[in-house]
Amino acid sequence: MPYEAWKDNEYIEKLVEELRANGTNVIVGSFDKLINWGRSNSIWPLTFATSCCGIEFVSLGAARYDMARFGWEVARSSPRQADFMMVAGTIVHRMAPVMRRLYDQLAEPKYVIACGGCAISGGPFRKSYHVVKGIDEIVPVDVYLPGCPPRPEAMIYSIMQLSRKMKVEKFFGGVNRKEKIADFLATHPEESMNY
């Protein structure tokens, strides 16, 4: 895919500039590239689908979209074997602690994609008393995927964006994830007891 076709190039370029400004050892940098290449080309999703976005995610495994060609075909039901959580659908307040527990059980480094209007902002139910107004109140989100429900092509694009993000992170030292968790805990002090 040509570089100009991507929508969020400014964010990735800023992240690369920050990493280069800190300096990287040649050997460690080479290991980072090798490990990140492997990690970004074989990310396994934890399916957390509660409504119509889940049906669109299931279609990624069919022959028409074939997520196996990207190395994502191993959709796990166990958080201990998954790399990222694809939250697809409406999250009610009763489901929020379960989702947080599953997120905590994901192995580090862990990522989250908020899929659809319901996961991003509550969707058509945002004024309801029982719906969480965006999963970023519960877990840190890496990629937002708008739509109601988003098409499978958009889901592929969002996972490719997550893959791009993983390719430029530092694996050794893990400064990116530690800073992100620290920022999340600064804005959500009630979650600090889980870390």
Image (cartoon, helix red, strand yellow):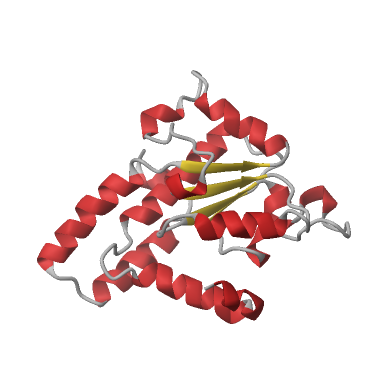
Residue at 41 percent of width and 67 percent of height: 177
Give how far across and how far down residue 90 sits, in percent: 74, 48
On-image quarter of the N terminus = top left
Residue farthest toward the top in the current orientation of the protein: 63
Q: Is residue 9 left or right of residue 27?
A: right
For the residue pair 113 and 154, the one nearer the viewer reads as 113
For the residue pair 165 and 52, the one nearer the viewer reads as 52
Q: Is residue 95 left or right of residue 78?
A: right
Residue at 33 percent of width and 73 percent of height: 18
Q: Image height check: is 104 above or below 116?
A: below
For the residue pair 77 and 163, the one nearer the viewer reads as 77
Residue 48: quadrant of the picture: top right
Residue farthest toward the left in the current orientation of the protein: 27
Q: Image height check: is 150 above or below 139?
A: above
Give how far across and how far down residue 85 sits, in percent: 54, 49
Give how far across and how far down residue 9 sits, in percent: 42, 56
Residue at 73 percent of width and 49 percent of height: 118
Q: Image height check: is 171 above or below 118?
A: below
Q: In this orientation, does residue 6 appear?
A: no
Q: In this orientation, does residue 16 appear?
A: yes
For the residue pair 126 and 5, the one nearer the viewer reads as 126
Number of residue marks: 0
Residue at 42 percent of width and 36 percent of height: 72
Give how far across and how far down residue 116 sits, in percent: 67, 46
Q: Is residue 103 left or right of residue 90?
A: left
Residue 32: quadrant of the picture: bottom left
Residue 59: quadrant of the picture: top right
